[in-house]
Image (spheres, grey):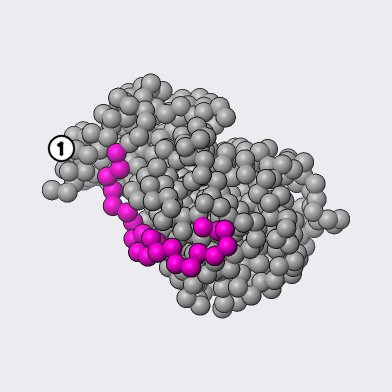
Amino acid sequence: MASSAITNAVRFFLLLTFLVATHSQSLSNPTYSPDEVSTNLGEVESRDNGQELEFRYHDHDQLTRYLRSVSARYPALTALYSIGKSVQGRDLWVMVVSASPYEHMIGKPDVKYVANIHGNEAVGRELLLHLIQHLVTSYDTDPYIKWLLDNTRIHLMPSMNPDGFAISKEGQCDNTYGRHNARRYDLNRNFPDYFKANMKQPQPETEAIKEWISKIQFVLSGSLHGGALVASYPFDNTPSASGLNAVFQSYAHSPSIAPDDDVFRHLSLVYSNNHAKMSRGVSCKSGSPRFEKGITNGAAWYPLTGGMQDYNYIWHGCMEITLEISCCKYPPAHELAKYWQDNKQSLIKYLAEAHRGAHGFVMDENGNPVERASVKVKGREVTYHTTKYGEFWRILLPGTYRIDVSAEGYLPQEVEFIVIDNHPTLLNVTLHSAKGDLAKVLNSLPARVQKTTAPPARPTPVTAAPVSDGVIVFPED
Ligand SMILES: [Zn+2]
């Protein structure tokens, strides 16, 4: 049976994890088919051939050719796939950069950046191309990049709104022409919302993203925008937001605090502190806001409904923040090299944060992975779920935590664990089947009685030491 094969595979992987802390086996099938014509170099123009990349804007065809040429030149480090098409039929390309580009590495995180969700915010689109270029050309020479790609699958989407970009104009800093998709929808107002019903008609670009992040458990994500210089973190919306609030953006709003506010603030600071100037918090122009340390709670800046970052976090347990990386939305191309230098460290260091906190596997007594087990850190009212391999990740700052793990048909477990700096905590949890007499008794009782008669949850020993020698070390630099 397939499940026992997976079980054996996972056991083997776990064994391997303890024996060697380097490459893992990847056993899953790729979720999306790689681009079938990626080996066709076609008419590679100028010097953007996968070996070099010029600092200029790339239209959709040029971008497509560049991505294909990289995947042809670096087949062991990259895979190109499309998650769907825009309204006007342009592919929504994603390039994976990793030592395992085609398969998920069990126990290791998948992360992503999505740029150009607003079509006229063009800097992030080019920066992701340069990030791809930097990662593939540094793998053999830069130990940090090698560590990152050996232990992380990085999915990079240079443009979520290629139709909007197609009509945008270089040099336009402040207007909204090209911001929306081809049907005039703002894609960062088009997601289901935790606080309010979002009545906007779902767009193909948004639907493709929703499908994508439901298939791959992303641990960490950044959404790249322009028009300000700040790292903005959930929540973007608030129970009290109104349309009127959003009009008066110069007034301070109340922050909308997420359960993982401390982690989101930390992640945002990692970006701003590694950026050449974001952490100075200088306003883009007179009258626009200053952001202390270059970070802000989304709703404290201005509340919005249907944003992508709240959706990632609440629906899929993916910690996403919004990165506003240029005061000018579509600056002249000759400034792109400077933007790359300003953001290069931030873009890399931020992704490495996926290795912070606790991660592990939820298994049954026989060592089979428990899929869709709910994992909830006490005091943080947001539920994460395990993957089909039983994996979970929880980015947390150093401290002592208690975690509740539960799944249908199993007795819930509560586990205490510690998180320290620079080393992820490996936390494996075994769930015991609720079959047998106790379960029969419990199931026959009304829900409220069940709660009081269920055995008290108590900390159970984890199957691995919280910090194991076999766990990958989080590098200092
Ligand atoms: Zn934007």
Q: Is residue 39 magenta?
A: yes
- Quarter of the image for the C terminus: give it: top right
Using the rendered view, name the quadrant where residue 409 is placed.
Answer: top left
Left or right: residue 324 compared with residue 260? right
Density class for disc 1 (Cα within 10 Å; few <14, some 14-19, many ≥20) is few
433 shown above or below 103: above
Q: What secondary structure prevails in the magenta region? A: loop
**SS for dot 1:** loop
What kind of residue is marked 1? Answer: Gly
Report the residue at 63% width, 51% height from top: 323
Of residues 112 and 440, the one nearer the viewer is 112
Answer yes or no: is residue 9 visible: yes
x%, y% of residue 302?
70, 57
Of residues 101 and 392, the one nearer the viewer is 101
Q: Is residue 265 magenta?
A: no
Report the residue at 44% width, 67% height from top: 42
State the extent of the magenta-drawn residues as a range.
25-49
x%, y% of residue 81?
41, 60
Report the residue at 39% width, 61% height from top: 38
398 shown above or below 451: above
Q: Which residue is mark 1?
A: 436
x%, y% of residue 90?
49, 72
x%, y% of residue 164?
60, 72
4 shown above or below 213: above
Using the rendered view, name the quadrant where residue 48 is placed.
Answer: bottom right
- Farthest residue toward the right? 286
- Farthest residue toward the left? 1
Report the residue at 27% width, 45% height from top: 27
Answer yes or no: is residue 209 visible: no
